[in-house]
Amino acid sequence: MKELKIQYKKILVDYIENQSERNLYIGQNFIRQLIQKNITPEEVIHMHKQVMEEIFPELPVVSRHGYDFLIEIMVYFGLTLKEHQMLLEQQEEMRIEMNVATKIQSVLLKTTVPQIDEIDIGMLSIPIRKMNGDYVHFLNDEENYVGVAVTDVVGKGVPAALCMSMVKYGLDTLEYAENNPSYVLEVLNRIIEKSVDDSMFVSMFYGRLDLARSIFTYGSAGHEPAIYYNAADNAFYGLGAKGLLLGIMPEMKYEQTEIPLYEGDFIIMMTDGVTEFRHDDKIDSRKIIEQLALTYSHLSAQEMCEKLYEELQKLQEQGLDDDFTVVIFKK
Amino acid sequence: MNINVKFQKDGEVVHGYIDGEIDTYTAPILREELDALEIEKDLLVQLDLSKVSYLDSTGLGIFVAFYKKVVKENAHFKLVGLTARLVRLFEITGLSELMDIETNTKVEYNNESI
């Protein structure tokens, strides 16, 4: 430290005599050396104070008080800065882990939209944050049935994502598309009820299309009713069903209903992120979706999903504030 | 966005008044307030939601957890003063079949099934 002080004194004296760029540059290089030696800012000020007193012994006492004050607050400044840097590092660590988790989720929950002649299927799922709290799962045995589960896990972010993987494995174990919706919901309810805490639950709409007979069978566990367009009536109907959310009570029963699908009919299944307009009570979002769906019913099911998202996004002043998921079956 | 919770004990009944929006951000506050309540056998906890302008699924989760806790202690739980919008939410999720819910305004729920 003594050595450093001698060097600093020389640099400072030079600068006081001649305030040239060069002398300033020497000072800057010297500071770089101090950083390598882990000298803190308050130590530098302390050194500066001593050197100034040596060069100008007649320095007024108020000036000394000024330096002492500066040294004290720089100690605090240094501590706060260190804390801040630590938080930034932690945040960066979390950001990296979150990115990894998002990647795992997207691989884990990947589902392929079935491409079949009998029915045109479209799907769009857009998370509001990094992790999606909505999940769509298709079961397809290529010849006889297509099953679709549209789910919404309570809450958002990481807890929702963890619960979601359970739903996925539950559906995977069911394996075959021919299962009855009421059976699927009962099995999943049992799995989820056993495994999650009391404030966690899942809403699910489960539909199964019999390809040969063109009969759509559906059940719902506390899920937003689907919208069904009947072309012959030129009318919309809600596909709701009584049924408690999954994961609340054990041994629940779920009812199921059948409807025939004819040419021109379509079914819109969605999560409440689609219908929930938080800041406007007066808007009847289901009516708006029906109107939009009619306007774009000449498009493919996939294009209809995309148009719905686009238009609903425009309607919400602050943008959508929930995960957005919509699936369309179009005959 | 804020939430205000007040309790008033009246014999075997605890009246709770909730005022504000219940969402991801305010739900933990509500959970804390409810957890702090001492639940004794046969107690009736009645929550007034007439001043609740918004409730999301995280908020529903808080009520479900609290409902389970109350039932476990052999006490009773009732929600009153729900707006039409909240009633719809409890109807769709099937929770209205499970819980005791009283509305100020009579709401006809049509689940539109065919």
Image (spheres, coloured by chain):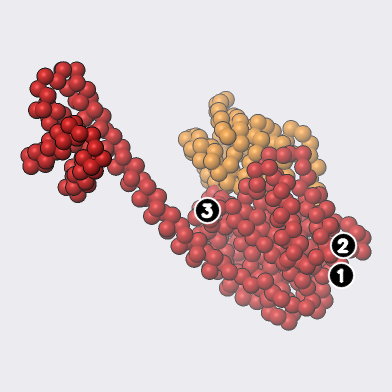
Chain colours: A red, B orange
Q: Dividing the image into 4 quarters, which one contains the C terminus of chain A?
A: bottom right
Q: Which mark is residue A157?
A: 3
- Label 2 crowd (10 A; few <14 / some 14-19 / many >=20): some
Q: Chain of mark 2?
A: A
Element marked by disc 1? loop
Q: So how many labels did they put on this image? A: 3
Give the residue displayed 21% in from the left and 30% down from the top: A71
Above-or-below relation of B39 to A306: above
Residue at the limit of the structure toward the left, as seen here: A2
Residue B24 horizontal side relative to residue A238, left or right: left
Q: Nearer the viewer, residue A55 or A80?
A: A55
Q: Nearer the viewer, residue A159 or A324?
A: A324
Element marked by disc 3? helix
Above-or-below relation of A122 to A222: below
Q: Which mark is residue A262?
A: 1
Residue A277: where, in percent of width, then height?
A: 70, 44
What's the residue type where badge 1 is placed? Tyr
Q: What is the spatial separation of the Cα atoms under label 1 and label 2, in whole angstroms?
A: 8 Å
What's the residue type where badge 2 is placed? Asn
Residue A220: where, in percent of width, then height?
A: 70, 59
Mark 1–mark 2 CB contact (< 8 Å):
yes
Instruction: Please name the residue that numbered disc 2 is placed on.
Output: A230
Q: Is residue A95 visible?
A: yes
Q: What is the spatial separation of the Cα atoms under label 1 and label 3, in whole angstroms?
A: 39 Å
Residue A32: where, in percent of width, then height?
A: 22, 47
Above-or-below relation of A104 to A275: below
Residue A175 horizontal side relative to residue A88, left or right: right
